[in-house]
Image (spheres, rainbow, N blue to C red):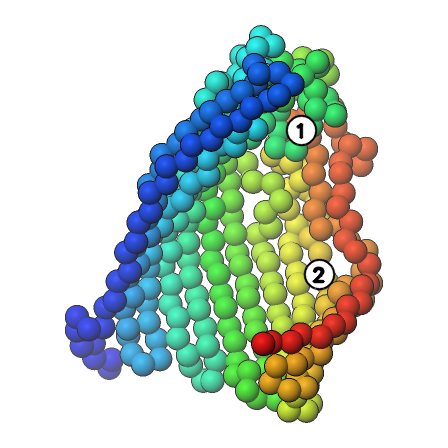
Amino acid sequence: MQKWNTKLKDFSTTVNGRYDDLRYEYKDHNDNVNDVSPSYNAFSYRAGLNYTINKDASLYTSVSTGFRAPTVGQISKNKEGIAAGYNVPAELDPETTINYELGLRGSSYGFNYDLAMYQLDRNDYIGRQGGSYSSSDGWGASSNVDEDEYYFNLGDMRSRGLELGLNSDRKKELSFSLAYTYLRATFEEYSMTRKDGFSYEHVDLSGKTVPRTSKHTVNLVLDYKPLPNLLISPELIARSSYYADEANNFKQNGYEVVNLRANYQITKNIEFFAKIDNLLDKNYYTFVTIYATDASLTLEDDATYRVAAPRSYYAGMRMKF
């Protein structure tokens, strides 16, 4: 039977805070109508608590906040839209985040591990009303769609997940490092403009999955030392399928790719290295984007595919002084 003896010295805390006073000034020398000088005040903090269970394990938890202020380009763009007669906001609220984390870390049977659950809330997300990937070069041009090209606080997102890190002893001839993430990211409150033919309507995307977020991501690295100064490391990266658009109409397949690297330590300060990315020369897409709220679009005809690089070779030398 395990006996628990909790003492104050088994606990440690971390608390810090930060205050930002941001003031911008933007001048458009072609048209001073677009001049803006926004300012933002934000306070962010982090508080953490660690409990040492024993010499090999500890529990930890934390809460932290963050923010992202609108850019002067976004504010100026909206001012341009107001001057053109569009119903867009003159001011935008900063995006804010709050992250909760609970985890267990330690070592056992020669392995180091770190297992954590987290929830990240992102509020007042700033994006184009017509879609995160809309562009003035396409149907999102201001000459074709009212306010869709301009920036709004579109809504809130929530990401919940689990992260696992597992490592063996790197001093041994053969070792490994494994990182796994399970992620579920959804729109909590989120509305955009949808194009259906030549008409437009606002749609509620609450409950939809945030695009380009895979539920499962794996990174596995094996380290092999055939010689004391030589390290050979094959790496596997794998992602599960994901949605290419906010409306979740188009799903893109996941992918797996293998890389290989080698390091040779000449002296304490000199190292040679070589790397092969995409060792198996696999043809895959790193991500796909599509104008998410246009009902007339298709993945085959209107998507933008970011094709991964083919097999690539690198070599070099590092020197430390």
For the residue pair 185 and 24, the one nearer the viewer reads as 24
Residue ID for mark 1 = 134
Residue at figure coordinates x 47%, y 53% from the top left: 161
Q: Is residue 55 left or right of residue 280?
A: left
On the image, the x and y values in percent for residue 193 come to 59, 21
Residue 203, compared with residue 172, is above or below; it is above
Report if residue 203 is visible in the image: no
Residue 169, compared with residue 187, is above or below; it is below
Cα distance between the residues tagged 1 and 2: 29 Å
Residue at figure coordinates x 47%, y 84% from the top left: 110
Report if residue 311 is visible in the image: yes
Residue 256: assigned label = 2
Residue at figure coordinates x 29%, y 60% from the top left: 14
Q: Amino acid at mark 1?
A: Ser
Q: Is residue 55 left or right of residue 142?
A: left
Q: Earlier in the sequence, mark 1 or mark 2?
A: 1
